[in-house]
Structures are given as C-alpha cells and as structure tokens.
Amino acid sequence: MLNRGYIQFLALILLLGSLALLPLFLSQYSLHLMILVMVFVVISTSWNILVWTHQISLGHAAFFGIGAYTAAVVYNAWQLPPYFDMLLGGVLSSVGAVIIGVICLRMAPWALAIATLAFAEALKILVIMLPGLTEGAEGVALPPLYGGGESAKVYAYYLVSGIAFLTVLTAFLLKRSRLYFAFTAVHDDQDAASMLGINPTKYKVMAFTISAFFVGIVGSFYAHYISYIDPHAAFNIHISVEAQIMPLMGGLYTVAGPVVGAFILTLLGEYLRITVKTGYLIIYGIILVLLIFYLPKGLVGLMENWTRKEGRALSSEKLR
Amino acid sequence: MDWAIFAQVIANGILTGGLYSLIAVGLTLIFGVMRVINFMHGETLMIGSYLTYFLFTLYGIDPFLSLPLAIFVLFSLGVGIQRFFINPVIDAPHFNQILLTFGLVLIIQNLALILFTGNYVSMTTSYSAVSLKLGPIRLGLARLLGFVIAIALTVMLSLILKKTEWGKAVRAVTQDREAAMLMGVNVDRVNNLAFGVGSAMGGAAGMVTSMIMYIFPLVGMLFILKAFAIVVLGGFGSIAGAVVGSLILGLTESLVTNYLPNGSGWAEGVSFLILIVILIIRPKGLFYVE
C-alpha cells in the first residue's frame, strides 16, 4: 500500500540531500539565489500554515521585519551570537502574532487580512519614527554573517536551508497531527467545531503564532546575511505579496506546494527583475489572477489530478 | 494656545476628511452589497488622477470638466471588472476574492508604472495658488472645491440609495442578500451597478486628489489603507459611518501633524492606530446597528 505522505517525505529528503551538495557546483551568485529561495520557502510555508484555518495574512512582511529589526537592534546593542538574535526574532514575531491574532481572529477573515496589512505599515512607520532605537529611515548596518567572503555564503546557505527544513518539517508533522484536524475543522464549520469543544480562536491564534515564528527567524537571518536593513526593505509589501502567491501557485493547503511555489517564483522573479526592470510585478498579478480562475489548487493539485487514477479509492478514503 | 492656528488645523482636517469620505464611501458601498474586500479600490483613484492630469496637461481641459468623464470611465471599468473578474468568483471563499482583487492591484499598478513611469507629477491650474480668507483661516480654493465635490457626490449617492428603485434594491441586498433575492431583486445587476458606482466614486476622488497633491502609480496604496481604517471605524457597509469616520481620521491627522513633535511622520500612523483600537473595542464599527 502506498502511503502518499511517506512518499512526499522521502522526496523531500532526497531533494534536501541534493540541495546539500549544491554549493559544490554553484557560483557565488547562484548560491545567493538559492539562499533567497530558502528564505522564501520559509515565508511561503509559514503563510500556508495559517491558511489551514482559512485565514489569510496580507502582511507577513510585518513578521519578517520584526525579525530583521530584532537582529539589528539586539546585535548592535550586545553582540550576542547571531543564532540568538534569530531565535529572539522568531519569539518576538510570535508575540506580535498573538496580539494581532487575539484581536482579529474572532472576527471574519477580512479583519485579519486588513489588520495584518495595517500592522506591517504601522511597524514601518514606528521604525522610521523612532530613530533613537532603530536609526530610522537610514537603516542599520550589521557585520557580515560568518565574517563575509566566499565560504561565508556556503555557511549561510546551510544555515538557511536548515531553517527551511525545520519549517517544512513542522508543517509536515503538523499536517499529520491531531492539531491539523482542529485547524481545518475551524475553517470547515466554525459552529460545529466549537460545539465539539474546539475553541476556534485558540487554534487560529496557534496557527498564526507558529506561522509568525519561522518568518521572524528568517527575517533575522536575512538582516544578518545582507548585513544591512532599512524599514522599506524589512516591511516591504512585496514580501507579503510573495507569501501569498507562492503557496497559491504550488498548491494551497499542501506541504509541498509552498516549497514548489517558492522555487519557481523566486527564480522567475529574479529573472524578470533583471530582464524587465520596470513593472515586472505585473507578471505576478497576471499569474495570481490566472491561478484563482483556472488553477485554484495550484501545481500540486494539478499533479494530483493526473495521478488520481491510481488509488482513487484509497486516497478518497484516507485524505478526507 | 493660539486659537487662530487651532481653527486653521480644524479646517484643514475637515477638508482632508471630505476627500477621504469620497474614497471610503465607494469602498463601503461595494463591501455592503457584495461582501467583497476590494483592494482594487485605491487603483480607481489612481486612474482617475492620471486621467485628469493628462487631460489637463495634453489638452488643457480643466479638472472640473473632466470630472464627469472620470466618473463615466471608472464606472464602466468597475462594471467591466465586476462582470468579468469578481462575479465568476462571487461564491468562492472570501479568501479567493481578496487574493483576486490583490492580483488586479498588481496588474493595474505595474501597468501604470510601465506607462507613466514612477515619477511624481503634479499640475498647476490657474486657481492652484488662490486661497480664500475666512476670518483667521485660509482655505486653498482647489481643496475647498474638492471638498464641495466630495460632499455633493456623497449626498447624491445617499439620495439615490433612498429614493430610487435601484437604491432600495441596494439597501435590501446589503441587509439580507437571500431575502432580497427571494423578493425578486436581481442581485447580479445590483452587484454590477454597485461596483460601478463605487469605482466611479473612487475615480472622482482621483480627480480631487490630482488637484491638491502629487500623483504617482502607487498613490492608490497610500489611500486604500486609510480607506479601510475608515470603513472599519464607521462600520462595514455604512455610508453615514464612512463619512463620520473620514472626518474623524482627517481631524485626528491634522491635529497630530500640528501638535506633536515630528507630527507629519506620526500622522501617517494615525489610521492604523484607529483601526487597531476600533477592532479591539468595537469590532463592528461605530455605527453598526443589528
């Protein structure tokens, strides 16, 4: 009997194994691209965890920014090891998520969508207006991660791949846990869920907190890796947009989808940015609209349709 | 405290509030009728602004003459977008609609970036520098006329909603979609017109902003966040709430700008603060009636 989850997991291990060997073959520039891919794997996978509860965030840049500024402020104050900043960045992002979540998640999905968008913008203004703490609009410099140079990029690549692996593993394990049923029950029928003793708000906030945690970590990593951060880069709406499109392209609700989406769209985005320059985001908009209309289940959903013939009875029974 | 300055600050706040209401009323109308969070609303403002700007700089057409045209163009665009993009997913989860309008934002914004470049532009009419003196306060003529337009259009919309057949249908659908449907209201048509009228209001707001500030392809984003704050403040779907919410935001911003150190920077954050506070203390808005 084929266990789909098991196959997915094996494929992931294989994929990560080959990714581990990549630095041997890649140029510095390509390695940099792969680091960006990994950053977005974390962001899109995290965003997708929230989607299981049928809530969407339009401001995941807020958590990325919290992480990045935690790194900048804490490192420049105490020079602790960057790993500490990253963990702290994740924790502070989660705290932000709990606050926004408790306020908004009792309400209709639009409340969270709008509040997260506003939250990211509000944090940007706060960072700009408090130059004593954050150096304001000018941004903060950080020493390069692992002392800079060629080998530093390889180390950075392994570090961010590790973070990405942990994120995807968390999503994978969550999806197989009882918690996932609570998450989806909350979105399938909120009233029924609460009658069965599942407190919808609690699980939504939980999903949101987990989601924010990893984005905060990777935000801190990014600040250390680029060794400079400013409010417009840290709270860039572009990050929030990518966070939505990548899972949608790969396949919402799945574990593999956001990863696939992050690979394709980061590389496509970089290619477009170099070749088209002005207004290349229009392609993203077109992709987004086409996906909603023609491929709401994403590429993974498309593949599932192709492979459905074998084991239809099995999957319909098991995946319900 | 200098009362003359205070009066000026209040007057500025009210004028800004008028402009906000023009944007927020359209947004709240669309939400009330269709329950769609329309992120594209800011882009109707952007298109209206550029339309007015190009008619003026290329053909010398006065902004006030291009107002009807802006309204007509954005109405048609709104009807088209509702018909071909929003309507097919009207029964899909909220979620898909939000992402869809977000995708449309990206398309329209970047199309504008390609066509008009990212440069800031502004226009100078013969009355741009004229201001009226009312006792201790000075009011820019363009801003004052913009305010008058905003109020006139909002009053007109309220009258349409109260008196006409379509307006009654709109209010029926806003209150209870299914009941309205059972009573024989053509909900598709109501949706379609509501989206068109809402977008036209956005276009009119664009005409007003083009007279008093810089125009650039991302100008819609600047206003849409404030408009959302207003709509949440006033209660989703409530026209009166949107107007009052706009005045509250305009006044608060004006007060913060003038009376806080570094006020103009902080003023940009007022709308978000209001949004969060309202979501905590009164999530259905100030004017929500069960």
Image (cartoon, rainbow, N blue to C red):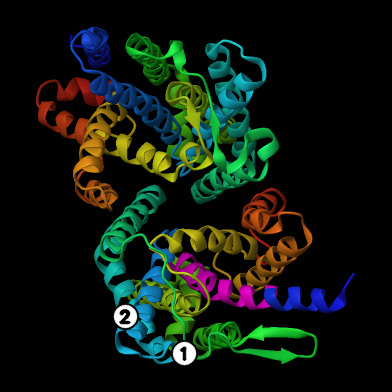
The chain letter under disc 1 is: B
| Residue B216, image x, y percentages | 41, 64
Q: In this view, does A267 lie to the left or right of A62?
A: left
Q: Is residue A211 left or right of residue B95?
A: right
The chain letter under disc 2 is: B
Which SS class for mark 2? Answer: helix
Image disc number at residue B73: 2
B18 part of magenta stretch: yes
Using the rendered view, name the quadrant where residue A296 is placed: top left
Residue A181 against residue B225 in the figure, above or below: above
| Residue B130, image x, y percentages | 59, 89
Using the rendered view, name the quadrant where residue B198 is placed: bottom left
Label 1: how many residues lie within 10 Å, few (<14), some (14-19) or many (20+)? few
| Residue B252, image x, y percentages | 72, 64
Residue B122 against residue A222 in the figure, above or below: below
Q: Which residue is drawn at 36% across and 29% down?
A: A40
Taking depth in this image into account, of A267 and A227 the one nearest to the observer is A227
Tell me the mark number nearer the camera, choosing from 2 and 1. Answer: 2
Magenta region, residue range: B13-35
Taking depth in this image into account, of B221 and B33 the one nearest to the observer is B221
Which amino acid, by three-letter code, is at mark 2? Val
Which amino acid, by three-letter code, is at mark 1? Thr
Residue B197 against residue B92 in the figure, above or below: below
